[in-house]
Image (cartoon, helix red, strand yellow):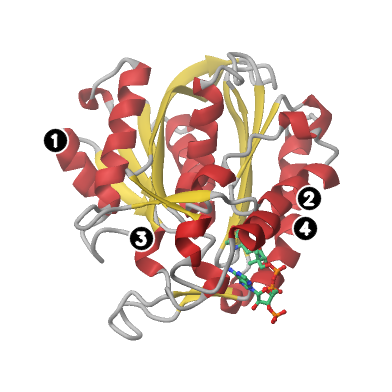
Amino acid sequence: MSVIRSAVIGCGAYLPAKVMTNDDLAKLVDTSDEWITERTGIRRRHFVGEGEKTSDLALKAANAALADAGITAADIDIVIVATTTPDDTFPSTATKVQAQLGMTRGAAFDVQAVCSGFIYGLSIADGLIRTGQARTVLLIGAETMSRLLDWTDRGTCVLFGDGAGAVVLRAGEGEGGNHDRGILNTKIYSDGRLGNLLYTDGGVSSTGTAGKLRMLGREVFKHAVTNIAAAIEASTQAAGLSTTDIDWFVPHQANQRILEGTARKLSIPAAKLVSTVAEHGNTSAASVPLALVTAVKDGRIKRGDLLLLEAMGAGFTWGAALIRW
Ligand code: ACO
């Protein structure tokens, strides 16, 4: 049976120039390189400079992905930006990127699922492609988390960073089996009852400000591994596969301990785990594509490999995606 599949035909990423090491942060709050490295695996993060916005990072990642795919903005039908740190309340960051790319057709919109935004975006893009509403989708995860951080809260300000990653998805043909190139399936979930564990203490219709990030880290940690593992099992089972079939595990880069805990729970060997959290911290919706692009560019991920992507974030939201590269 012939089916439409969404194949990733190009990818690119961008990290802002300003780097903050753990030692740099220790000058701002009562923390240490030792504490941050031991508890999180994070060594440094990138922050935007003055006036640098989420759309600036998104545009740079988008241009890199388009060049990698060998296409131009004129070939794109839809732009999706997964972000929880839009430039402005409206218009969407995606429409800004659309304009900056010189695109005068198609549609552009943002997806707000915090750290799971890229997985949600993959699910939406795949749906648009498989139902014939789009042939080519540009999906970007871009964040300026530094704008949401409370620099007096050492429990959160050491964890996050800024950045962007993008993929170009294009309709292709498959046979309907798990050897097809492209997205084999996506699974997305949320549980709004857990919203009080990770949130901003402000918003447009509550305080009229963006607010600052607040988190009960230990509670978030408890839910993370269980929820992610359940999504992964649902995804692999739906494809008639098991976690032993996976070539590369590309998780949301929140905390090295969560990454390793999830890999262990699912019997995924550490050698198959793509971890970039040391280099950029938790960049929310940008983290999965940042890790993905790193492993593609350094030659680890090759055509035909089976990739398992996952994320979990505020909401709670979480999900997984299985991709044949
Ligand atoms: N430097 C030094 N000490 C610190 C720091 C810091 N930056 N932050 C907290 N501490 C102290 C606390 O004050 C506390 O001190 P006390 O015992 O004297 O009260 C002690 O360290 C332990 O604090 P905990 O919060 O219990 O530390 P924990 O071991 O749970 O680690 C962490 C905290 C790293 C936040 C962990 O809970 C975590 O990673 N949680 C997951 C959060 C996450 O990744 N969220 C991202 C979004 S959701 C997602 O992406 C999955």
Question: Which label lies toward us, 4 or 2?
Answer: 2
* Nearest the eye: 321 or 174: 321
The count of marks equals: 4
Among the 4 quarters of the image, the one containing residue 218: bottom right
Q: CA distance from mark 3 to mark 4?
A: 27 Å
Relative vertical location of residue 171 with respect to residue 42 in this rendering, above or below: above
Amino acid on which disc 2 is placed: Gly
The residue wearing badge 1 is 104
Q: CA distance from mark 1 to mark 3?
A: 24 Å
Relative vertical location of residue 123 with respect to residue 24 in this rendering, above or below: above
Pointer 1 local density, CA inside 10 Å: few below 14, some 14–19, many at least 20: few
Q: Which mark is residue 226?
A: 4
Q: Are marks 2 and 3 in contact (CB under 8 Å)?
A: no
At x 54%, y 74%, the residue is 30
Q: Is residue 64 visible?
A: yes
Badge 4 or badge 1: first in the primary sequence? 1
The residue wearing badge 2 is 261
The residue wearing badge 3 is 85
At x 60%, y 53%, the residue is 254
Name the secondary structure under disc 1.
loop
Image quadrant for the C terminus?
top right
Residue 166 spot, x, y in % from top left: 40, 35
Pointer 3 local density, CA inside 10 Å: few below 14, some 14–19, many at least 20: many
Amino acid on which disc 4 is placed: Thr
Residue 257 spot, x, y in % from top left: 72, 53
Q: Are marks 3 and 4 in contact (CB under 8 Å)?
A: no
Amino acid on which disc 3 is placed: Thr
